[in-house]
Image: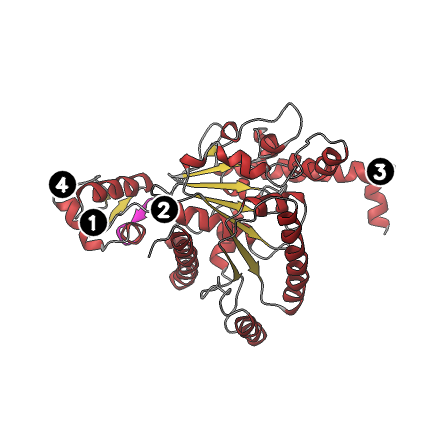
Amino acid sequence: MNAWADMQGDIGFHEIILQQGGMISDKLNLLRLEHFPPNANKGLRPFSLAEAAYFLGVSASNIKKLHLEGKGPVPATSPSGRRTYTAQQIAELRDYLDRHGRADFKNYSPCRKPGESLQVVSVVNFKGGSGKTTTAAHLAQHLALTGHRVLAIDLDPQASLTALHGIQPEIDRNPSLYDALRYDSGKRPISEVVRPTNFPGLDIVPASLELQEYEYETPLAASNRIATDGKLFFTRITDALREVDDHYDVVVIDCPPQLGYLTLTALAASTAVLITIHPQMLDVMSMGQFLLMLGGILESIGKAGAAVRLKWFRYLVTRYEPTDGPQAQMVGFMQSLFPKQMLAHAMVKSTAIADAGITNQTLYEVERGQFIRQTYDRAMDALNAVNEEVASLVHTAWGRA
């Protein structure tokens, strides 16, 4: 009590909070500058021959053969003969294989074909700490590395997905998604807000604290009859995405940990919903309440005239520890209740993912040599299995086998 009183002195709580928020922001900026110098873009590590083969869906020997025959991009080769490819070179290899592969065999590019609609996957949960942002970031990056054209949208005012991609809103002061959603004359086309990332094929619409204004302005807009359309806020993301529909195959939305207007706007735009769940009793109980509210609100959205376009939804178990008995029981409980809606794969809890996040990186960005190999491989195998399953659901929604 005395220590707090000494720190507070004669200034108000709001001043203390503002000071401490500024201190955190300044310290984070110093850390950011250590890893990302001013005016420099966030880089991306090279990928091994085996990783390149995985992302392309071919064998490593096929890629090696192309290199030996002088075909396709030239990888970097170490003195020991180890080949590595940049993400851009993997994209170039995919184009080469599409042009020169057997026409009756397969298409190496998974991009949308004529008649296939844009897929919008929202990652949601009522509680923070369920792994939403980690899931959304790795899913978007995996889809991009495997050849999809991806737009990630950070809908959380905390902007964690934005920070993971090297953008610090309070420092960069760039436009955010709020500028594409706002109700006044400052509204901008979403194309003016989209920014490229360090992953070829992956763009991002960043977030900022300004997004919270949308939660306050939406009911005000309704009460003031700013918009005469009965749908009002439901279709704002849907309408914004029409402008860039032809540029992307999949949109991945990282929703805030609350069922407010931002999340509802995302759900109205979604063709799919991925609900993250930590397999603990309190989390599952909270999810039950979340689902009751979500179902009721989706029904209301439909009655208001906004089309609910969901083709699928799934539960993804996150931060899973298979050796934890109660967690394993909870997963079994959920699988018995929702056998068709549970993803077959879970995302395991891993120090590799947590350690990568300390420097605002994902597992796809860090070198395997920075971790104990068994730890890294276990986490990467789980990530890839989850992301492959979601990609398969996206392709099924397109009507592909």
Residue that numbered label 1 is attached to: 63
Residue that numbered label 4 is attached to: 70
Of 342 and 292, nearer the camera is: 292
Quarter of the C terminus within the rendering: bottom left
Q: Pinpoint residue 74: horizontal percent, then vertical percent.
A: 21, 39
Cα distance in 3D space between marks 2 and 3:
50 Å
Identify the colour scheme used.
Answer: secondary structure
Closer to the N terminus: mark 2 or mark 4? Answer: 4
Residue 49 falls within the magenta-colored stretch: yes
Residue that numbered label 2 is attached to: 145
Residue that numbered label 3 is attached to: 12
Cα distance in 3D space between marks 1 and 2:
16 Å
Cα distance in 3D space between marks 1 and 4:
11 Å
Q: Mark 3, residues whose alpha carbon is within 10 Å: few (<14), some, or many (≥20)?
A: few
**Residue 89, placed above or below residue 327:** above
Cα distance in 3D space between marks 3 and 1:
64 Å
Q: Left or right: 360 with respect to 178?
A: left
Task: Tell me whether circle 1 and circle 2 mark residues in contact (CB < 8 Å).
Answer: no
- In this rendering, the label closer to the viewer, 2 or 4: 2
What amino acid does circle 4 point to? Gly
What amino acid does circle 1 point to? Ile
Q: Mark 4, residues whose alpha carbon is within 10 Å: few (<14), some, or many (≥20)?
A: few
Q: Which residues are magenta?
A: 46-50
